[in-house]
Amino acid sequence: MHHLRHAMWIVLLIGLTATSGEATTESSCPAPCKKLPSANIFVREPAGTLDIAGNIAPLSGQVARGKKHTVLRVDVTLQLTTNNGVTGIYQAVSVNGVNLGGIGGTEATQACPAANATCALTVTYWLALDAAEADHPGVFIKHPLVVTFSGGSFNVAGAGNAYHATLAAQLLKSN
């Protein structure tokens, strides 16, 4: 895993309008995605609003299939305003339903500054597919990789607050 070869990033961004509110989700393979990308996916929500529980609308992207001797790199960012009682934010990432969180948890958190400020959290996750497949047989290798990113206010506040969220996943060869 010391020497990773970079796969080409898919740079096509095609916008689609989400069904709720005025939010616009952009993706390198918007639904209905007819040909899944073989190694990279990018999804972002540039103008979302937190729901009644202070959560974002989850972002999801899919890579065609997991391969032996590869690592899935997932980069996620959540940025939101801290009015309406928001004191911190969280984010959680899963691949094929398996959480990529830390020890004993499924999420990363960030305390936020005073009200009416911007709070942001960026995390990079690495998933070695050979090791993940050994822990979860039949889940990753030769199967589509569905990456899901959720998050929001960790104190169930901020309904209606604006947010921006991005998800980028890249399948890389490992050595």
Image: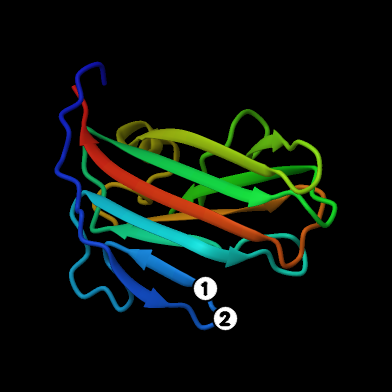
Amino acid beneath label 2: Ser
Considering only vertical position in the picture, is 67 above or below 158? above
Residue drawn 14% across the image and 44% down it: 8
Q: Which residue does the image show at 54% across and 78% down from the upper left?
A: 22
Task: Establish if 72 lies above or below 165.
Answer: above
43 relative to 33 in the view: left or right: right
- Tell whether label 1 touches label 2 (CB within 8 Å): yes
The residue that appears at 18% across and 22% down in the rendered structure is 175
Determine whether, in the image, residue 52 is placed left or right of residue 91. right
**Residue under numbered circle 1:** 23
* Residue 57 visible to the viewer: no
Residue ID at (45%, 34%): 124
Residue furthest top in the image: 2
Tell me the element at label 2.
Answer: loop
On screen, 57 above or below 96?
A: below
Among all residues in the image, which is located at the extreme bottom?
Answer: 19
Residue 123 horizontal/vertical position (percent): 50, 35
Residue 122 shows in the view: yes
Inspect the image, locate mark 1, and give the three-letter code of the amino acid beneath it: Ala
Colour option used:
rainbow
Q: Nearer the viewer, residue 104 or 114?
A: 114
Question: How many numbered marks are there?
Answer: 2
- Answer with the quarter of the image where residue 143 lies: bottom left
